[in-house]
Image: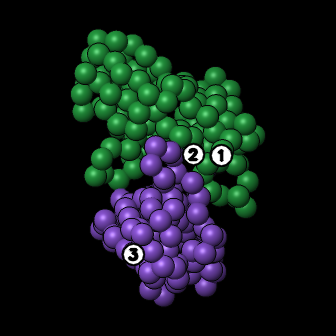
Amino acid sequence: GNSVTQMEGPVTLSEEAFLTINCTYTATGYPSLFWYVQYPGEGLQLLLKATKADDKGSNKGFEATYRKETTSFHLEKGSVQVSDSAVYFCALSDRSGGYQKVTFGTGTKLQVIP
Amino acid sequence: ETGVTQTPRHLVMGMTNKKSLKCEQHLGHNAMYWYKQSAKKPLELMFVYSLEERVENNSVPSRFSPECPNSSHLFLHLHTLQPEDSALYLCASSPGSIRYNEQFFGPGTRLTVL
């Protein structure tokens, strides 16, 4: 079956530091890949996505590139802010019947300190 | 605001109570999902409804009973729960079209079972 592995947290960075959160996946077929973010007390929000190999998703300064050869979708940001503190989930999606079946990683908590 | 609402946001119940969680989506989506999010565990998919028909039930105990009366509403009926059922319960929806394959999440219901 499908699976997603992402780096253990928590990750603590100073403001303006460079961020990388690693994510690798196992899947049959050609899944879509996502990063979701969960701020304290809220549900998950889509941060960015990529639907095919070599696609780069980007949003709010975050980027991730769909690497089929390494089955990876690492999240990066050049300069983090305190407001980026949240839990980040890597996920993949397969279409099964009439709905999207999503497999999530365990989440990586990011804490940015001033 | 993702277009998916959940009520109540917080719920405390005893093991002998019966309660229901409600989810409503205003996005015209065809599929709706219930997830359980517990501390230090991956997001667990509980149920999936596609076009109001249950298409997935991931070995969830019978004390959880879903209901999808129409494509905009999803309920999770709870009875005789256990303390280990305390968690954040997230509802999500997704479109039927294969082009738009992300899920949209509600803010969740924080459930505490005493």
Tell me the quarter of the image containing the N terminus of chain B. top right
Query: In the rendered image, which quarter is residue A61 located in?
Result: bottom right
> Disc 2, disc 1: CB below 8 Å?
yes
Query: In the rendered image, which quarter is residue A85 located in?
Result: bottom left
What is the three-letter code of the residue carrying label 2?
Phe
Chain A display color: purple
Discs 2 and 3 carry the same chain letter: no
What is the three-letter code of the residue carrying label 3?
Ser
Residue at the spot 39% in from the left edge and 50% down from the top edge: B43
Q: Between label 3 and label 1, give the one nearer the viewer.
A: 3
Q: Is A9 left, or right, of B97 in this rendering?
A: left
Residue at the spot 51% in from the left edge and 25% down from the top edge: B8
Cα separation, mark 3 vs mark 1, equals: 30 Å
Q: Position of residue B37 (x, y in %)?
A: 38, 44
Question: Where is mark 1, residue-wise?
Answer: B2
| Number of residues whose C-alpha sits closer than 10 Å to that of mark 3, classed few (under 14), some (14–19) or many (20 or more) | some
Chain B display color: green
